[in-house]
Amino acid sequence: MTSNLLNHQIDDILGSVLEDASGDVYMINPSRDAIEEFVNVATDFGGSSPSIRMLADERTLKDVMDDFIVASNAADLIADGTLSLRTIDEAPENSLLITDDRVVAVVHAGDRVGGLVTDDDGFVEDTYETYTERWEGATSFNLRTPPITDVRETLAEEISPEAEEDFTSILNSLETARGDGDGLDEVTISLLVAAKNEALLYDISKWGEDVGIASKATFSRTKTKLEDMGLIDTEKVPIDVGRPRLRLKIGDDRLREADNGQLATVAQSILN
């Protein structure tokens, strides 16, 4: 009998399942925390990760994927074939991890998490078949966030390698990127990076729309908000034909003096 995974954190349980699994793994009805931890574990996983089929509550998925950091890393996993997302209508009471040789029920008890494991052949086979059938009939979840790899590569190519380094440093300094007071959103971060590197509004907004972060109109509205609050300034740059374009610049001395690790914190304090 496989040992239960008691007194573990959810990332330990997920890591153990990924390390031991050889075929597809079903992740059924994961909590918000479990989805976030899975993305972290799978992103950092050193070995060859099995394919994960996640059947989750649609509202929970939408809430988790509102965080650009989680969503863009999940999009990377989807792009490389590690992760597939579908929604579940009738969820079991507990979260389940199902492989071809064991079923793990993830049980939360206060701040403790346990993985109750069975490797009974008949039970595992029946459970695996049941959720394979449910998977086939489930609705795909449309994650519109671009993969973080694409975001970084295109930012380096279309704006500058320095802008990509700044963007990555700011993301690494944040726990979440939602723009709801708990973290800056991806458009604000992009504009701050552009201002720090004195890029054109046209270039950063075109890049953002092309890569799938947001529309040019969203970039323009956010630029106006940041400019009105004094975080960024603009200067007109003449071009051969048409209206002058706007170069973005940092507008607040506190931001100019902050390094990338502090830039998000300082910007957030000004915005709040």
Image (cartoon, helix red, strand yellow):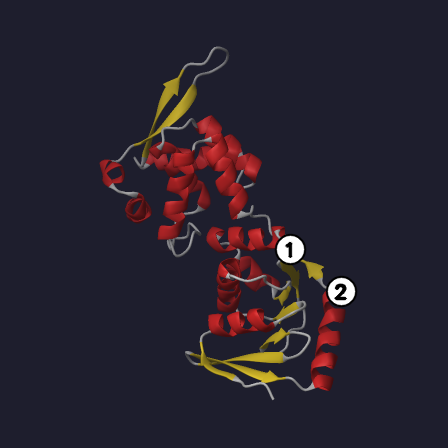
- Picture layout, residue 114 above or below residue 75: below
Which is more toward the observer, 126 or 225? Answer: 126
Q: Residue furthest top?
A: 240
Looking at numbered disc 2 in the image, what kind of residue is underneath it?
Glu
- Picture layout, residue 238 above or below residue 227: above
Residue at x 51%, y 42% (from the top left corner): 151
Residue 265's spot in the image, x, y percent? Answer: 30, 49
Query: Looking at the rendering, which quadrant does residue 89 occupy?
Result: bottom right
Residue 272 can be seen in this image: no
Q: Which residue is mark 1?
A: 81
In front of the other: label 1 or label 2? 1
Of the image marks 1 and 2, the number of the one nearer the N terminus? 1
- At label 2, counting other C-alpha atoms closer than 10 Å, the crowd grade (few under 14, some 14-19, many 20 or more) is few
Is 13 left, or right, of 102 in this rendering? left
- Picture layout, residue 191 above or below residue 43: above
Residue at x 62%, y 58% (from the top left corner): 82
